[in-house]
Amino acid sequence: MGLLDGKVAIITGAGGGLGEAYARLFAKEGASVVVNDLGGARDGSGDGSVSAAQKVVNDIIAAGGKAVANGDDVSTMAGGENILKTALDAFGQVDILVCNAGILRDKTFGNTSEADWDLVVKVHLKGTYCCTMPVWTWLRANGRPGTIIMTSSTSGLYGNFGQSNYGAAKAGIYGFMRVLSIEGRKYGIRVMGLAPGAFTRMTSDLPGRKGQEPDPLSLPENIAPGVLYMASDLAADHTGKVLGVSSRGVREIKMLQTDGFQPGRPYTAQEVADHAAEVFFPAAPEKTAASA
Ligand SMILES: NC(=O)c1ccc[n+]([C@@H]2O[C@H](COP(=O)([O-])OP(=O)(O)OC[C@H]3O[C@@H](n4cnc5c(N)ncnc54)[C@H](O)[C@@H]3O)[C@@H](O)[C@H]2O)c1
């Protein structure tokens, strides 16, 4: 018995890195998997090729699993629709969508270009929209429950130096996830957020990691079980939540507010300043993307 027996899962950007590990584990747990990947470089440049996705599919099939490759671009509506079509043509249904595909164009804000901003936001935020809308529409039209996992990042949830375009896109995904999880409740569609931390081509040369041997617990195959949990019925009671999954394990990341300054009458800016201890959280070491 696998945790995903009888389920069909679409995983975007699954020709390498984290998505590949999810695809391999989901297939091992009984899911039929659509392995989407456009190919291309880490910054989204270069000609796409379905060969990376096809290799993952070949390995899954050789191991006795079920999978099909798709080379569409997640950041277009036509791409998102064709990814769903690939699932329906091959397996007749879809139950799980993991929006994972992504690129990186890190620079300090003053050095970023509008083109960098547009492409990073397009692949991450619009790409999550373009893949979610067809799946959502199909689930609703067929009265079926489902699970959608959207990949955010501590870079968007906490902030991280040099990642203004990426952090903005990832925070946007968080907001999208929260809203859709509320809309999905009455239809049995769970929408979860993921903030992974892993050693992949995306992170292998970040400051502090370059030239370092990766912590084995940060390899994608050791992150995938946390994501399998989110996709499976083991997490059936949870929606609208973000899990951080990294070498340090699995934990919920939450937006919080203080009780605040509540005068219950018109007030002045000076009074807000005078009640700063109630407005703000006590000064604690700030949690950043690097420490999360
Ligand atoms: N690795 C980490 O520590 C980390 C941290 C936070 C968030 N993330 C997020 O996790 C996801 C996976 O990252 P990763 O580390 O495995 O990176 P990765 O570069 O190894 O994998 C991303 C994959 O997405 C594919 N892709 C890019 N643009 C695409 C498009 N338009 N259409 C289809 N496929 C496309 C790439 O070809 C690549 O195979 C990303 O969304 C990333 O932002 C990763």
Image (cartoon, rainbow, N blue to C red):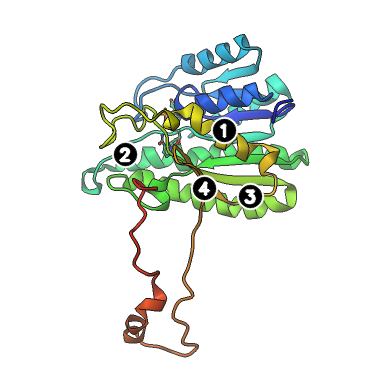
Q: Horizontal and vertical percent for residue 251?
A: 52, 47
Residue type, numbered disc 1: Pro
Q: Horizontal and vertical percent for residue 106?
A: 29, 39
- Front residue of 190/93: it is 190
> What is the C-alpha distance between the residues marked 1 and 2?
32 Å
Measured along the vertical axis of the image, is residue 161 above or below residue 106? below
Of discs 1 and 3, which sits in the foreground? Answer: 1
Residue that carries the numbered disc 2 in the rendered image: 116
State which quarter of the image contains the N terminus: top right
- Within 10 Å of disc 2 (Cα), the crowding (few <14, some 14-19, many 20+) is some
Q: Horizontal and vertical percent for residue 74?
A: 50, 32
> What is the C-alpha distance between the residues marked 4 and 1?
13 Å
> What is the C-alpha distance between the residues marked 2 and 3?
32 Å
Of discs 3 and 4, which sits in the foreground? Answer: 4
Of discs 2 and 3, which sits in the foreground? Answer: 3
Q: Earlier in the sequence, mark 4 or mark 2?
A: 2
Q: Earlier in the sequence, mark 2 or mark 3?
A: 2
- Within 10 Å of disc 3 (Cα), the crowding (few <14, some 14-19, many 20+) is many
Residue that carries the numbered disc 3 in the rendered image: 239
> What is the C-alpha distance between the residues marked 1 and 3?
18 Å
**Element at label 1:** helix
> What is the C-alpha distance between the residues marked 4 and 2?
31 Å
Q: Answer whether labels 1 and 3 touch (C-beta < 8 Å).
A: no
Q: Quadrant of residue 89?
A: top right
Residue that carries the numbered disc 1 in the rendered image: 225
Residue type, numbered disc 3: Thr
